[in-house]
Every structure is written in C-alpha cells, then in structure tokens.
Image (cartoon, coloured by chain):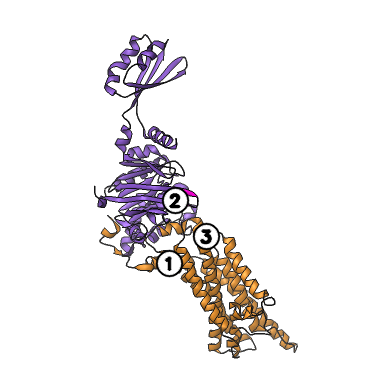
Amino acid sequence: MSANASGQFQLVKEKGWRRGLGNLLQGEYSAWFKSSRWWKQLLMWVAIINGMMGTMIYATAEAAKDGTEGPPMILMYGIFGGMFVAVGVMIIMQRVLVGEKRSGTAAWVLSKPVTRSAFVVSRLVVNSIAILLTSVIVPGVILYITLGLFSDLGWLSLFGFLAALLMFSLHTFYWIALVLMLGTLFESSGAVIAVPMALFFAIWMGNDLIPGLIYVSPLLLTFSPVPEQMSPLSISFITGEPVSSWLPLIVTVVSCVIFIVVAVWRFNRQEF
Amino acid sequence: MNSNDWVISTESLSKSFGEIHALKSLDLRVPQKSIFAFLGPNGAGKTTTIKLLLGLLKPTGGSGKIFGMDIVRNSVDIRANIGYLPQDARFYEHMTARQTLEYTAKFFYTGPQAEIDKRVNEMIELVGLEGKADRPIKGFSGGERQRLGIAQAEVNYPDLLILDEPAANLDPQGRRDVLEVMSRIRKYATIFYCTHILDDVQRVSDQVAIVNQGELVTQASIEELLAGTGELIYTVILRGDNQGAYTQVTQQPWVSGIESSQQDGHAIWQVSVTDEAAAEDQLMSLLVSSGVKVSNFSRKGQNLEDIFINIVERSQK
C-alpha cells in the first residue's frame, strides 16, 4: 500500500536538490496566479507607476503650453519604478519565508519528500516572476506605449527601453533576493523589513558620508540620488547616452548570487 | 528480530537546544506493522523525537534509521514513504481541503490526474469531510483541520504513519473515527503516534514507549505493561471496628501493603497483593472471620493511566 507500491500512479522522478521542486513551483504559482493576488498587485503598480507618469505627461504638456519646462519624466520613472518598487518588494517579500516558518506551513511542506533547496528556489522563482511582471514589465510596457502616444518624447528606442526595463528588473530582483536571504537569517518580519529599508536609505542618503558608496549601489541601475554626479544605467539606455560605469550592474549581479547562495545554505541548516 | 524488522530504530539519539537537553540518548525500536504509542508528559521530548525522525531537526548525537535508511543522510527518501500529522497541523489558508490533498499527493505522484482525484476523494471520505472539501481551510474548525491533517498524512498510503496527537481537537465521535482509521491502516502500515489520551492507547496500540525528561523510561508491549510488576489491588469497604482485621491482613505474606481511607463512616482499603490465588482464597474469609462487615469487595483493574503516572513519577525521583 505504500507510495512505491501504487502501480497505477506515476511516481515523482525528480532527483537530488530538485526533489519536490515541480510541485512547489506549481503550488506557489497557484497562490499568485489562481487567486486575486496577481491582479490586485498589478492594479496597484499600474496605478502608482502609470498613474504618476500619466500626471507627469500631463504636467509636461501643460508646461509646454506656457512655454516652460516640464518635470524630468524619464528621471521620475526611475524613482517610481526603482525606489517605490524596491520598498514594495520589501513589504511583499517579508512574509514569504518568515511567515511560513512562523505559521508552521514550512515545517509541514518539509515533512514531505522535498529538499530545502527546492523550497527556497520555488519561493524565489515564482515570487520574482510575479513581482517583476506586475511591478516592472507590465507597467513598463504600458508606459512605453503611453509615452509614444501622448508625450513629446514620442516613440523611444525599443532596444534602449527594453535594456532599461532589464535594469529595473535586476534592481527589483536584488531586493527580492536580499529579503529572501534575510528571511532565512531572521525569525521576525520586523528584522526582515527593517534591514533592507535601512540599507536602502543608507545608500541613498549616505553619499555625503561615504562618497564612493553610490557608485557600487544597485540603486544606480534605476535612479541616481546624485544625478549631477552620475546618471542611472536605465536612463543612459533610454536616452542613448554612454554608460558612465558598469560597476553598479556588476555589483548587483554578484550580490544577487551571494544572497541566493546564502539563503539556500542557511535554509538547509535551519531547524523547524 | 534483526535490524531489518524494525521500521524505526535509534541509537543514543539526542538533541540539545543550547543548555536544554530535550532528548537524551534515546534507544527506540519500532516493529513493523505495529501501532506504537509514544507517551510522555508535556515537554518529555516526544515532538522533538518525531522532528528528528523527519529531518526537521538535526540530532546533536547518536543516530537513527527508518526503513534501514539514515535519518540525516536519507531524509528525503525516508519522507517519500512516510505520512505525517503535525501536532498543530497548519496548511495554506487560501487552499481548500481538496486542493491541500491534491498538493500533498503531488509530492509523491505526478499522475495520472484521474487517479490522484480518485485518491483525494477517497481521503476526503475517509475523514468525513465530504461537505467541506471545496471550502477554504481558513474557515475550518480545529477538529476539521485535524481530520484534514489525517487525510493528508494518509494520501500516499505510507509505509509508516507518524501522528503527533491525532485525536487532539476532536469530539468523541471524531476520536472514535480516528481510532477506526488507525485500526484499518495497521494492515498496511506501521503507526507511530504520540497522545495524551491513554484510553485510546489501551484500545488500539500493541507497543508503548514512555519518555520523560528526554529519556526513555520504558518500552514494552501493552500486555507487558498492563501486567506490570504482577501486583494486584483489591478494594474493600468495611464497617465496624477494623483494627483486628487490619493486623491480621497485613501479617499475610502475600499482602504487600494497605492504603486506608475513611468515607461516610466506612473504611476504604486498597489492599495490594502479590499472589492473586492466595488473595482470592483467603482475603475475604480473613475479613469476615475478624468480625468486620464487608459492604464491598472488588478487584481493581489495572489501567494504563495508573501505570503511566506511576512510571513517570518513579522516573522523576
């Protein structure tokens, strides 16, 4: 009567660290996309990013009528799509691992034939896809069309805009990976949200104290706290200006890899 | 029995949380196809043991095997053949009972979907959740969650079922149903379970282990445990002056002690004897011949609760 003796069933064939991954991905996917969660998130981000940017387009058009200069639209997109989304990620992701550890659902799932690595990877992959789709990709595409149709900027270079969206995605992924890692290190949501929040504002505000800090920060992928010193990579791609430094991109990618490795390593050593 | 006959075997298995020694050198042997009750007061180390067996905790010392596989190195393979009900079963609140069972089943099987659906329906019926299978778990009572917990533990027809307090949160009917399910499953699987309801243990278990303060105090079959030290207790209720009777009875070599109390002008004696035949033949006649009026004479049945309390209290001294 055991699972292995159930002849009519096809047994799970995943081996090694991937054991249970397929079902974990499916479960997490259902939690996002077979519920109201995805469209509520999407609606919220479209309202924030595209709503704000719509206001900018309108303000620019009004300013043009008066013969004055409107707000710097592309720079503002960097703030809405970069800073706002980063804070949103911290709020959305803080419960992903900590919440499951505290509620006991993680222990329940881990009592099934799944590896802990698969558990972490499933949370990372599905949450990343869902957050990137709802807060970066779809609002970005809507913005591209809106700018083309209604703004003086007209149709921007598609390649440049896609490269900028990639920067926004990487920046968002950086915060997703960081918060996920913190979820394996701490047991309380407070710490998981406070640490990235503090880091975010330290990088943003700390330029005066540590002048070099900003040049290695993931923030520079989307917006620059010191625009007079350095343009963010996303803006360079959209406007076609030369990229002033690739360092923020390299630091972000390396940081993401470190965060994921630490998260998997730490989760494999946790007790439930 | 050789080592392959044990479904679970542990050697000096121990677990400490800092200075707290939750489990101290546990040597446990669980035979195949048994219903094995793992008993102990709160904080004795029962749940810690279960979590060590499932790989949710890592041992501080010693080792353990399930189906001959190491509980640390082969944890995932072991879990592929286990069903587990946690003490305070928690599931994803947004899922329905049916979705939870399907989700659980798919950790073991990829298909065919029709067979998975059939198994899920069978489990829903098994625990009597037919009317609530498609409602989100968010609205479930403690008893309904417990029933779902039992269903998800059994969904893969495991070789070993580990149940942490299976009858907790259940009404008497629910408790009876759980015991019936356990009795039915024993043909196919070994059941290792913790409980505080000792009546249930006496009804369905074949083997019992008692832990206290992280240590195994005893492990025996239920018959061996109930037989205890061979000591029996007779309860007699007497009227009149019983001083002479007391002296006579305590002088008998087969009487190991008398506990006396008073109630409504009657003396109530609990007479402990070591020889059942001698007691049956002589105790009553001794009492009558000494001139006391005997208004009640009965043999007190040994129950697991008394034995459990005695064993635990003795282990604490």
Q: Mark 1 or mark 3, which is nearer the start of the sequence?
A: 3
Which chain is disc 1 placed on? A
Q: Give the x, y percent position of residue A231.
A: 63, 85
Q: How many marks?
A: 3
Q: Give the x, y percent position of residue B236.
A: 38, 19
Please tell me whether the stretch drawn in magenta is mainly helix, strand or loop: strand
Residue B101: name its quadrant.
bottom left
Q: Is residue A238 above or below residue A21?
A: below
Q: Which kind of residue does numbered mark 2 sit on?
A: Arg
Q: Is residue A176 above or below residue B27?
A: below
Q: Which residue is the site of mark 3?
A: A99
Q: Are marks 2 and 1 in contact (CB under 8 Å)?
A: no
- Magenta-colored span: B16-22
Q: Give the x, y percent position of residue B176.
A: 37, 41
Residue placed most toward the observer, B115 or A190: A190
How far apart are the two marked residues, 2 and 1, measured between alpha carbons? 28 Å
Q: Which residue is the site of mark 2?
A: B145
Q: Is residue B21 magenta?
A: yes
Which chain is disc 3 placed on? A
**Residue A152 left/right relative to B232:** right
Q: Which residue is the site of mark 1?
A: A117
Q: Is residue B142 magenta?
A: no
Question: In terms of secondary structure, where does tag 2 sit?
Answer: helix
Chain that is coloured orange in the picture: A
Q: Which kind of residue does numbered mark 3 sit on?
A: Gly
Q: Is residue A241 above or below residue B179?
A: below
Colour chain B appears in = purple
